């Protein structure tokens, strides 16, 4: 089974948007109160009830709260129960060592509520551009139908972003990956050239002035009176510009990863530790860092390039089309000559030029790195099936 999420923009009036905001607030409150109960009152609960706090116990208390407060009962109970389920799963992940301790949800950050498909009406396609769906206690919600929905709908999530409200349908459908005999390729991720292929192709995100506009509106917001309506308006405008720039970057990554998945069967990339690469260089008071401003700018560029998201998109798209993604050790890939095998930092003159000091081989630095990545990932020892078999034989020995 394959899972996919289909996201659409909601076009609703002010009354509907106000109701969405109230539902998000109630769901967020239910989650935070339940988190506080599990964090600070679990001992008292266990002494009085003889058992630990769980999802069923908190769901029963939620029913009593809804009977007492109309503004809580106004929100769909399914969305509030889903918040309790999320919290229960978060604690299970924490105790299993898969995640950290659950944190409270915040306004303008966690503005969303989820409803199971059993409580959602059938999606009605109005025409080629519009569709609508009926949600409990909300009614018909009209959204922009930009692409057809595939599979059976599992959950429906209404989420608020900087550019408005969206509805997300989580779907599941049967899919059998086809046989993929396409050639392999190596990919080097960078900043100036975001993607370099071992075939010699270079891809960069299209230039945009949105980042400069975002900075201008951030400066405007900082000059206005703190916590005033005019400052809030400027912050909202800056957030919309940042969201638009993020959507453009995501669209570009979707286009490039789809083209690569259609052309190549095996995609080889470096196993980058992006969190370590984008760590701050400020240091401590006793041992302050050096070149902090330069490192800060580099960190912004790395995060804006979204290397990890590119890897995630490429992985599931290649797998969907019968291919695979192989990750290799990134050491020495940018300073190694693919012709003679020489490893020397001096081989890379600058960001763009690679010139081997031993044999004189010359190439674009990013393309040269992609060639080395491709060679390292297509050796017999790098094939996933064979490496897995080798680990099994080692254990047996």
Image: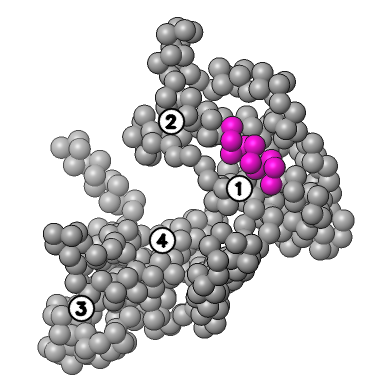
Q: Residue at x 78, y 36 (%)?
A: 136
**Which residues fall within the magenta stretch?**
21-30
Q: Do callouts 4 and 3 mark residues in contact (Cβ within 8 Å)?
A: no
Give the number of the mark in front: 2 or 3: 2
Give the number of the mark in front: 4 or 3: 4
Disc on the earlier residue, 4 or 3: 4
**Mark 1 to mark 2: distance in Å?**
21 Å
Give the number of the mark in front: 2 or 4: 2
Mark 3 lies on a secondary structure that is loop
Disc on the earlier residue, 1 or 3: 1
Which numbered tag is attached to residue 335? 3
Q: Tell me, yes or no, whether the highlighted magenta stretch contains residue 24.
A: yes
For label 2, the residue is: 91
In-image side of 342 versus 62 (left or right): left
Q: Provide residue 270's location: percent of width, then percent of height.
A: 31, 65
For label 4, the residue is: 308
Mark 2 lies on a secondary structure that is helix
Q: Provide residue 374's location: percent of width, then percent of height.
A: 32, 71
Magenta span: predominant SS is helix
For label 1, the residue is: 111
Mark 1 lies on a secondary structure that is loop
**Mark 4 to mark 3: distance in Å?**
23 Å
**Mark 4 to mark 1: distance in Å?**
24 Å
Disc on the earlier residue, 2 or 3: 2
**Mark 2 to mark 3: distance in Å?**
45 Å
In-image side of 312 versus 107 (left or right): left
| 340 lies above or below 311 | below
Q: Residues within 10 Å of mark 3 (few under 14, many from 20)?
A: many
Q: Would residue 319 be seen by someone viewing this image from the given angle?
A: yes
**Mark 2 to mark 4: distance in Å?**
26 Å
Q: Provide residue 303's location: percent of width, then percent of height.
A: 40, 66
Q: Residue at x 68, y 59 (%)?
A: 164
């Amino acid at each position: 089974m394959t899972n996919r999420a289909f996201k659409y923009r909601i076009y609703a009036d002010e009354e509907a948007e106000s109701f969405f905001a109230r539902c998000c607030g109630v769901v967020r409150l239910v989650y935070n109160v339940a988190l506080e109960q599990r964090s600070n009152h679990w001992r008292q609960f266990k002494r009085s009830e003889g058992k630990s706090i769980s999802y069923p116990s908190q769901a029963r208390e939620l029913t009593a709260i809804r009977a007492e407060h109309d503004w809580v009962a106004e929100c769909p109970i399914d969305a509030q129960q889903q918040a309790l389920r999320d919290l229960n799963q978060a604690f299970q992940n924490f105790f299993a060592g898969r995640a950290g301790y659950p944190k409270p949800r915040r306004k303008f950050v966690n503005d969303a509520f989820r409803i199971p498909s059993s409580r959602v009406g059938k999606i009605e396609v109005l025409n080629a551009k519009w569709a609508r769906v009926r949600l409990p206690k909300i009614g018909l919600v009209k959204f922009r139908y930009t692409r057809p929905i595939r599979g059976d709908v599992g959950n429906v999530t209404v989420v608020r972003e900087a550019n408005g409200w969206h509805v997300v349908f989580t779907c599941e459908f049967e899919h059998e990956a086809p046989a993929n005999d396409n050639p392999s390729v190596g990919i080097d991720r960078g900043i100036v050239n975001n993607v370099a292929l071992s075939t010699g192709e270079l891809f960069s995100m299209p230039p945009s002035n949105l980042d400069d506009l975002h900075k201008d509106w951030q400066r405007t917001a900082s000059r206005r009176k703190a916590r005033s309506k005019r400052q809030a308006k400027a912050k909202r405008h800056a957030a919309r510009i940042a969201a638009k720039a993020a959507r453009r970057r995501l669209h570009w990554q979707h286009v490039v990863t789809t083209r690569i998945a259609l052309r190549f069967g095996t995609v080889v990339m470096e196993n980058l530790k992006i969190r370590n690469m984008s760590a701050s260089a400020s240091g401590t008071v006793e041992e302050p860092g050096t070149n902090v401003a330069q490192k800060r700018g580099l960190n912004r560029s790395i995060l804006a390039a979204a290397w990890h998201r590119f890897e995630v998109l490429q992985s599931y798209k290649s797998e969907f089309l019968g291919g695979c993604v192989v990750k290799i050790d990134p050491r020495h890939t940018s300073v190694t000559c693919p012709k003679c095998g020489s490893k020397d930092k001096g081989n890379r003159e600058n960001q763009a030029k690679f010139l081997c000091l031993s044999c004189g081989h010359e190439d674009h630095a990013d393309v040269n790195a992609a060639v080395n990545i491709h060679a390292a990932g297509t050796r017999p020892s790098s094939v996933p099936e064979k490496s897995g078999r080798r680990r099994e034989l080692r254990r047996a020995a």
